[in-house]
Amino acid sequence: MVGGARVKAKRSTRNLAKTLLGVAVILAIAVLAGTAAYSTLSSILNPNHQTRLQRYTSRGNDVLVTLGVTGVQVAFPSEPTISTEEVHLFFATVKSQRRISVIDDDAVEAVWYKLPDVLRGQDDLLRTLGTVTASDLRGVMKDVDVHAESRPPALQFWVPAPAGQKGDYHVRIMIHDNYVFVLRVRASVDGPRALNYFANSFCTDKATCLAPKA
């Protein structure tokens, strides 16, 4: 009887092992099938394997947003969050309005504030504002480009990422109707392209505002 019980126990153990092995194989096949299905679906939905920021610049689902009482509209990659930000000018701290759309590790931002009276008419005003903006971003302006012929005139540059931060800041500053507008894109890849797309959506006449051109 004891020998028969041992044989039965061994058989039960072998059967259990076979069952567990079968379950493991089935689970492995299911995981592989699910991974393949996800990869196939991702390829269909995003055939070029673009990041969300790249899809934004390829005419994604832009969200046109009016910047407060200014009447200006810009196109964000998604509905932006409303917040405020302090701008440290040489003589005072100005409270600005901010809209920010975070996509993965990148961010698309618009900041604006009323131009202080003391600065109006100042020579080289855009460069002055660029200097304080870069300082607030904990850096300095790089590759400064003045768009004097654009409407409104603009200053464009980038600021290297400070220690501990992912992505450089790509910035365009414009002045319209006594408001300062700072458009920023923080990104590790395709920052300049994203900024140009964002800035091209900047529209001062709501009656004629359209989605930006790629």
Image (spheres, rainbow, N blue to C red):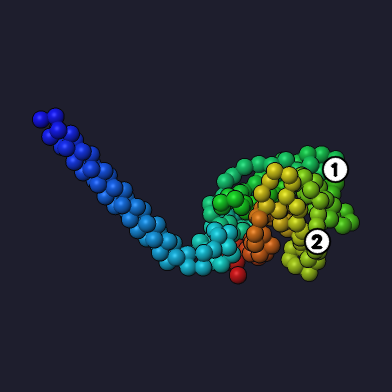
Quadrant the N terminus occupies: top left
Q: Residue at x 29, y 52 (%)?
A: 26
Write down the residue under mark 1: 90
Residue located farthest toward the front when viewing the structure as drawn: 3
Q: Secondary structure at mark 2?
A: strand
Mark 1: few/some/many CA within 10 Å (<14, 14-19, 20+): few
Nearest to viewer (mark 1 / mark 2): 2
Residue 108 picture location, percent across and down: 62, 53
Say if residue 165 shows up in the picture. Answer: yes
Q: Residue at x 89, y 56 (%)?
A: 123
Task: Say if 149 sits above or below 117 in the image.
Answer: below
Residue 6 picture location, percent across and down: 18, 34
Name the amino acid type tagged 2: Asp
Mark 2: few/some/many CA within 10 Å (<14, 14-19, 20+): few
Question: Is label 1 in contact with label 2 (beta carbons under 8 Å)?
Answer: no
Quadrant the C terminus occupies: bottom right
Write down the residue under mark 2: 143
Residue 73 picture location, percent across and down: 61, 58
Position of 33 compared to 136: left or right?
left
28 and 178: which one is in front?
28
The Cα atoms of the two marked residues, 1 and 2, are separated by 23 Å
Residue 164 picture location, percent across and down: 70, 43
59 and 49: which one is in front?
49
Task: Say if 88 sits above or below 202 in the image.
Answer: above
Say if residue 205 shows up in the picture. Answer: no
Residue located farthest toward the right when viewing the structure as drawn: 123
Position of 55 compared to 144: left or right?
left
Name the amino acid type tagged 1: Phe
